[in-house]
Image (cartoon, rainbow, N blue to C red):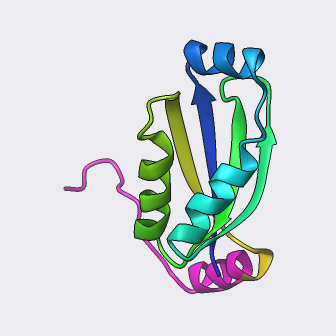
Amino acid sequence: MPQYMTQFAYTAQAWAALAQKPVDRSEGLRALAEKVGRRLVSLHYTMGEYDGVVVVEAPDDTTVMAIIIGAIAPGHLKATRTTRLYTPAEAMEAMRKAGGANYQAPSPGTR
């Protein structure tokens, strides 16, 4: 089943609340994913532009979008970015298909 990675950034208020009362957010995310019939693969916290990464398994983009909408609705996130992850086998299949595809790039003087 396809996997999707969502990077997220908390608001300052969310960080303040978590600092006052630390909570393992993975259980809430797991329940949310299961509510729409999907599986939480992992939750990791990061440093930098985003505060964490969530990986879920879902059959399609619409299902992942439903999970994300449910997760951001309370207003504690200021940003998200979701990326479809591909297995090496899926990437190899795409490379094989691309190997047989030819495309003529525009050249000067062509319309």
Residue 94 locus on image (x, y percent): 62, 79
The residue at 60%/29% (across/down) is: 9
Residue 65 locus on image (x, y percent): 43, 58
Q: Is residue 91 magenta?
A: yes
Q: Is residue 67 left or right of residue 29?
A: left
Q: Is residue 6 left or right of residue 75?
A: right
Asked if residue 50 is positioned above or below residue 82 in the image, the reply reads above
Asked if residue 59 is positioned above or below residue 5 in the image, the reply reads below
The residue at 76%/34% (across/down) is: 23
Which residue is more in the foreground, 13 or 59? Answer: 13
- Can residue 84 be seen here? no
Asked if residue 78 is positioned above or below residue 66 in the image, the reply reads above
In the rendered image, the residue lying farthest to the front is 21
Quadrant showing the N terminus? bottom right
Q: Is residue 22 magenta?
A: no
- Can residue 95 be seen here? yes
Residue 31 locus on image (x, y percent): 63, 61
Which residue is more in the foreground, 99 or 4? Answer: 4
Residue 85 locus on image (x, y percent): 66, 64
| Magenta residues (range) | 90-111
Q: Indicate the quadrant where residue 34 lies.
A: bottom right
Q: Indicate the quadrant where residue 105 lies.
A: bottom left
The residue at 36%/53% (across/down) is: 107
Quadrant showing the C terminus? bottom left
In the rendered image, the residue lying farthest to the left is 111
How many numbered marks are there? 0
